[in-house]
Amino acid sequence: MRGNVSLTVRLATLFALLTAVFLVLAGAVMSRAIEHHFLQLDHHELSGKLNLIHNLVRRTTSVDGLETLPGRLADAFVGHDGMGVLVRDSAGREIYSGRPGYFPAAQLAGQRLPDGDTIWHKDGHQYIGREAVLKLPLSQAPPAELRILIGLDTSHHMVFLQQLKHRLWIGIGFAVIVAALIGWFAAHKGLAPLRAMTATAQNLSAEQLGQRLAEGDAPAEVLELVRAFNGMLHRLELAFQRLAAFSADIAHELRTPVSNLMTQTQVALSRSRSAEDYREILASNLEEYERIARMVSDMLFLAHAENGRLPRPVEVVALEDEVRALMDFYDALADENGVRISLSGAATVTGDRLMLRRAVSNLLSNALRHTQAGGVIELSIDRSESGAVSLSVGNPGSEIPADQLTRIFERFHRGSGERNRHGEGSGLGLSITRSIAELHGGKLSVRSVDGWTSFRIEFPRPDKGPDHTLAQAGTPVRAMT
């Protein structure tokens, strides 16, 4: 069968072939059983007629009785039109003959039939016959024998079997056609989810990824495929949504620095300027370029994180050491702003050292931007009895509005009001921090009440995170002014 034949046709054809084979075998068995039944009937018929003749011969005890034997045989076989009888004595003389035309010429000439029932054909008819030798119990003569040849016309059995086979073939042909139609309908109905899947796949586009296949009508064999297909559509839809959001965000955010660069360049080219003026313009442009570079780098990091393309964290990282290194880095900025930074607690986790440092740096720089002079930024590393580690960064300052708490981790979201006026952040720091926390099997949360805002990274217990092991270190405390 050609490879481009539909699966529905293949299943219908297979169903029809199996039905045909089953019906042919059933018909052959039935025909064989009927033939065997007819043979048994014919055997009993021949045996019964031989017993009838034997009873007549057994009562022939005199010469007079022998003379009346043909008449008695003729009377006994009245109405038996399908039976031929030939009775001869031991010398071959014919004593009684009834429908001798049933017998072959060889038997009429005196040739004996084989033992048992014998089948022969003559003039388009089928016969079954038997030959037997009976002793004449004559009291006044030496013992004599009679050869009895009987034949039964079984043509009506053959006609019945031929008609039966003919009707069986017609019935089998009709049944095969019906089976093929039923098989085609069943396969067509059962493969409806696949056709729906094909139609859905053909109509897929970036604007129509919300389509889903109905799982309720799918058979059990196709249900898993339908669920997998729906899952694929869901993942594609999310990926396209992330791509659309990514494109929209980066286009929106790049518009401002690119516009600034174009404006400054146009102003610079509007008239002749001194070398010092050009140097100042280039320095200003460099700041915009650096901002664009940081933004592109951050967006690429988020794109890799969302698509699972970041390296797996496998290092043993001492959180205290990384936080202390960052505190040294932000020392000058904290002194300039009149802010103190304190650290308490220590623990180690299994992760990526550079990514963890980046996450803490984002939280610490965010806290520095929103802490007024004289305030204290508190960093705390805690380890629970279950072995889970958490890192908290808290600072005093204006609270984050409740309606903004669920959105501050979105890309380029900078909140509103007072907090939006602090610093020149790109709005990607908290998104990157959340991605790093999730990469390590943890989560990032925020709490802002009573003039205190605290961000908390929670790492899972060792038995909850497959790539993380935790160990407790000492608990030194360091303060920096």
Image: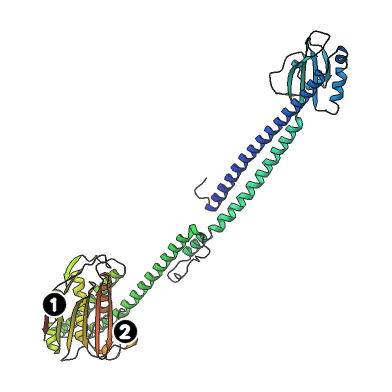
Near mark 2 (Cα within 10 A), the count class, few <14, some 14-19 or many ≥20, is some
Q: Nearer the viewer, residue 349 or 87?
A: 87
Q: Nearer the viewer, residue 3 or 40?
A: 40
Note whether residue 377 is visible.
yes
Q: Residue at x 64, y 39 (%)?
A: 27
**Element at label 1:** loop
- Is residue 449 left or right of 113 when viewed as pictured? left
Q: Is residue 162 above or below residue 428?
A: above
**Element at label 2:** loop
Q: Position of residue 219 (x, y in %)?
A: 51, 59
Near mark 1 (Cα within 10 A), the count class, few <14, some 14-19 or many ≥20, is some
What residue does disc 1 label?
475
The quarter holding residue 321 reads: bottom left
Q: Residue at x 11, y 84 (%)?
A: 480
Q: Position of residue 449 (x, y in %)?
A: 28, 89
- Amino acid type, callout 1: Thr
Here the colouring is rainbow
Note whether residue 295 is visible.
no
